[in-house]
Image (cartoon, rainbow, N blue to C red):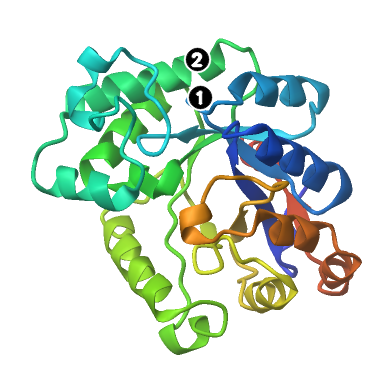
Amino acid sequence: MNIDPNVITLIVHADDFGIDKETNLGIQYGFNNGILTSTSIMATGEAFDHAIQIARTTPKLDIGIHLTLTETKPLLPTEQVNSLISRSGDFHIHINRFLLQYMTGKINLIEVNNELEQQIKKVLKENISITHIDGHQHIHVLPKIWSITTALAKKYNIPYIRIPNEKIKFADGQKITGVSRMLQLLILRAFCKRCKTNEFNKDISFFGFLSGGKLNSYSFNYLLNNMPKETVNELMCHPGFNSKHYSYWRYNKEVELNTLCDDKTKNKIQQNKTQLISYRDLIKIRY
């Protein structure tokens, strides 16, 4: 496969593989019946084993590692991750709480390194091909955690790391999201700008934060029309069947799944001559 510089090149990526069975089945369905090309697995997800089963029976599905320090349970014993957990013994439910702990110097970076490495090792132990790393609630782009993530990617020979630096003008972006999401993006972009561009993220443009949990035909068309041809583009999405997760953010995973599988979406891809690829394809092209 070669990348055609005259058309949009697009990775359609589902986060949260392994968080629950409903999400896993939605990702599998979106790959088999829609435009989904890639996903990333949560070593800490309650349905990790179920996700691994799907990965083995769907070998063409491109898989990365979804590093996680929020919402789920740590892999390491609680006494080894005291700074990362709440009183319940779980990770903090939301990035905002973790960010407060991080900004006030209460997060032990050695514990972060050890937990994230344990997550990577758990996935690699399953002997499935891993092409990239991203982070649950984008926690991996916090500056000191970014340094840990890149060091681990080098150690375990993982070629790509997502930088979720979505570039859409504020006024235009409001067509697909609200003001609060735009403000969150501005904060996220501030962290992303401190992530040094290197061999892990060269020439990949990111989309999907603004439409997070709300990807529909309108927002998909809008985003596709704004994607550059000179880079590879990644569109993040969260498909699933009746998933309980992200209820506090009002994510609608079924709408996202239906959008990925809709004939109108497939026709839009064909009309725009969009080239769908995965990180696995990108590795074959560039390495």
Earlier along the polypeptide chain: callout 1 or callout 2?
1
Residue 195 in view here: no
The spot of residue 97 in percent (x, y) is 25, 48
Q: Left of 143 or right of it: where is 213?
A: right
Residues packed near mark 1 inside 10 Å, few (<14), some (14 to 19) or many (20 plus): many
Where, by quadrant of the figure, is residue 3 drawn?
bottom right
Report the quarter where the N terminus lies: top right
Q: Are marks 1 and 2 in contact (CB under 8 Å)?
A: yes
Q: Give the residue displayed 27% in from the left and 17% down from the top.
A: 78
Q: Which residue is mark 1?
A: 43
| Quadrant of res 40 | top right
Which residue type carries mark 2?
Answer: Lys
Give residue 279's position: percent from left, percent from top: 64, 41
- 139 or 81: nearer the viewer: 81
Q: Which residue is mark 2?
A: 122
The quarter of the image holding the C terminus is top right
Residue 216 in the image: above or below residue 107: below
Q: Residue at x 45, y 83 (%)?
A: 169
Q: Dot 2: what SS?
A: helix
Q: Quadrant of residue 179?
A: bottom left
Mark 1 secondary-structure assignment? loop
- Which amino acid type is marked by label 1? Ala
Instruction: Please state which of residues 22 and 160 is positioned toward the viewer in this rendering.
Output: 22
173 on left or right of 281: left
Instruction: Please determine whether, in this image, residue 150 is positioned above or below residue 46.
Output: below
127, above or below 72, in the image: above
**Residue occupying the point 27% across, 63% down:** 190
| Residue 132, above or below 210 | above
> Residue 268, can we see it?
yes
Q: How many marks?
A: 2
The 10 Å Cα crowd at callout 2, few under 14, some 14 to 19, many 20 or more, is some
Q: Residue at x 61, y 71 (%)?
A: 228
